Amino acid sequence: MVIVSACLAGVKCKYNGKSNFNSEAEKLVKSGKAVPVCPEQMGGCPTPRLKAEILNGTGADVLDGKCIVVKENGENATQEFIKGAEEVLKIALLTGAKRAVLKSGSPSCGCGSIYDGSFSGNKIKGNGVTSELLIRNGIEVVSEERLNI
Ligand code: SF4
């Protein structure tokens, strides 16, 4: 089984109430090979919601208690993001998933690069909170950009 970001499969769970539809991700789910998850919704965030970014660090730093996730209005969203990551890990373990295909850039799902916390579109190297937790638990994480290669 593969874990896939629900927004890639067409679920309208993105912060702005839209999806990030990707036909290859949809195919994975329709064929029964993948289970869709949205860590931010599972952590208790509403949809639509304010944008959030990791401030001065990466998902690894969030998990290690070294930095926080902030919403555009400055509110702290760290607990929701950690809870969402833990719930996704639970589903990965329940389904025996060894691989995850997650949405690039997201402070939860991003893999390899994420937004830098300035809400200006700049990216830095690093993983989102959910990607990092899955990787720490032996699950291979790739971004959806790899699906269309
Ligand atoms: S948290 Fe992940 S699955 Fe949910 S909308 Fe953001 S990128 Fe998509």
Image (spheres, grey):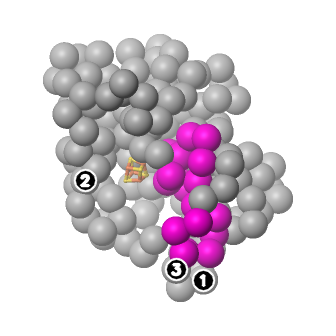
Residue at position x 60%, y 59% in the image? 123
Mark 3 to mark 1 CA distance (whole Å): 5 Å
- First in sequence, mark 1 or 2: give its number: 2
Residue that badge 3 annotates: 72
Expressed as whole percent of the image width and height from the top left, the position of residue 52 reads: 52, 68
| Quadrant in the picture for residue 77 | bottom right
- First in sequence, mark 3 or 2: give its number: 2
Mark 1 to mark 2 CA distance (whole Å): 25 Å
Residue that badge 1 annotates: 74
Amino acid type, label 1 = Gly
Amino acid type, label 2 = Ser
Amino acid type, label 3 = Glu
Residue at position x 65%, y 20% in the image? 138
**Residue 84 showing in the rendered view:** no
For label 3, the SS is loop
Of residues 41 and 138, the one nearer the viewer is: 138
For label 1, the SS is loop
Magenta stretch: give its range: 105-122
Mark 3 to mark 2 CA distance (whole Å): 20 Å
Expressed as whole percent of the image width and height from the top left, the position of residue 2 reads: 40, 21
